[in-house]
Amino acid sequence: MNDSTPDMQALQFTSDGQLRHLLTLDGLDKPTLESLLDEAARFLTPVGELPARNTSLAGRTVANLFFEPSTRTRASFDLAGKRLGADVLNLDVNTSSRKKGESILDTIYTLEAMRVDVMVVRDASAGVPAYIARHVKDHVSILNAGEAEVSHPTQGLLDLLTIRNHKPEIEGLNVTIVGDIRHSRVARSAAQGLRTLGVGELRLVSPPPLAPERGDFPGAIVTADLEEGLADADVVMALRIQRERIGNLDGIPGIDEYFATYGVSEDSMKAARPDAIVMHPGPMNRGIEIEGSLADSERSVITEQVTNGVAVRMAVLQRVVKSLESR
Ligand code: CP
């Protein structure tokens, strides 16, 4: 199923240059990223006001196909579709016919026959979103909602939007990602977007067994020293250990030692810039990769990331459905 044909951009875009599928941020150019962030920003409303809505997806159908657990991504795609006026179908994979041996493509063809326009796919295997995108009819768009350790493009976009809302320029920022980098699709998508937008230093801090493979994060500084990684950081993102993707936990410190050595805490954040923001994609393990009081502090933008996730997914849905009209 691992589908690694080099030209993902040819797959993501229509022949006239419109975004048809969102499979990866890798290779998306700066104008495309910035225009998606600008569109998402327009969907943000002040706290206390009703969330933004329109009817741009009226008559369209969005299906959420999550073959791995999710709270934030699934709920926000659900809300995003509804706030744009779409019919939204949340397939319960535990009671779906995949449990009876139906292939993923037969499931997709079944939904295609029901005139689903957008399929939002999360899967534990690398290559699944692109594989599906290569097989669907012209009237269907595929959005990657989390692909193994490879890619989580809408998470990357919401992280960029959150940073942009707090820092005037991404260009030149010091961004530090701490935790299980090796197994993190969040880190990969964030790094791809940040590189395109001209990040200053991208630093990756983790114990050696969770460090990235060589060449996986071009241009990033890799270290096992938290204080070094956090020095003068503008943005700090903590990541959980992705136990579901780790066969052997040998060499990974126990909880207390992990928190003492790699935990992002009020104390360890003293090395960062005084106005540094703290991010976490969720789900969080308080007291392991992040101190609970820091996650709840004024410098934390973790709940804002969640809010921005709905806006970003609205922008992406609206963009790919617009491309439908020219197909
Ligand atoms: N950040 C993220 O993907 O969270 P969920 O697994 O809850 O969707």
Image: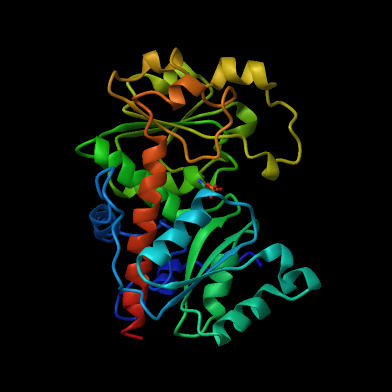
| As drawn, 288 above or below 62 | above
Q: Tell me the residue at 52%/25% (across/down).
A: 290
The quarter of the rendered structure image containing the N terminus is bottom right
The x and y percentages for residue 261 are: 57, 17
Q: Residue at x 59, y 31 (%)?
A: 285
Indicate whether 258 appears above or below 285. above
Can residue 58 be seen by looking at this rendering?
yes
Classify the position of the C terminus by image quarter. Answer: bottom left
Residue 115 position in % (x across, y down):
50, 85
Give how far across and how far down residue 47 sits, in percent.
Answer: 28, 42
Q: Is residue 170 shown to the viewer in this render? A: no
Q: Is residue 324 above or below residue 207?
A: below
Q: Nearer the viewer, residue 268 or 57?
A: 57
* Residue 126, picture quadrant: bottom right
* Image coordinates for residue 193, horizontal then vertical, percent: 36, 49
Nearest the viewer among 149 and 196 is 149
Q: Residue furthest left?
A: 168
Considering only vertical position in the picture, is 226 above or below 219?
Answer: above
The residue positioned 53% from the left and 21% from the top of the image is 263
Q: Quadrant of residue 93?
A: bottom right
Q: Nearer the viewer, residue 152 or 114?
A: 114
Is residue 288 left or right of 144 when viewed as pictured? Answer: right
The residue at 58%/49% (across/down) is 149
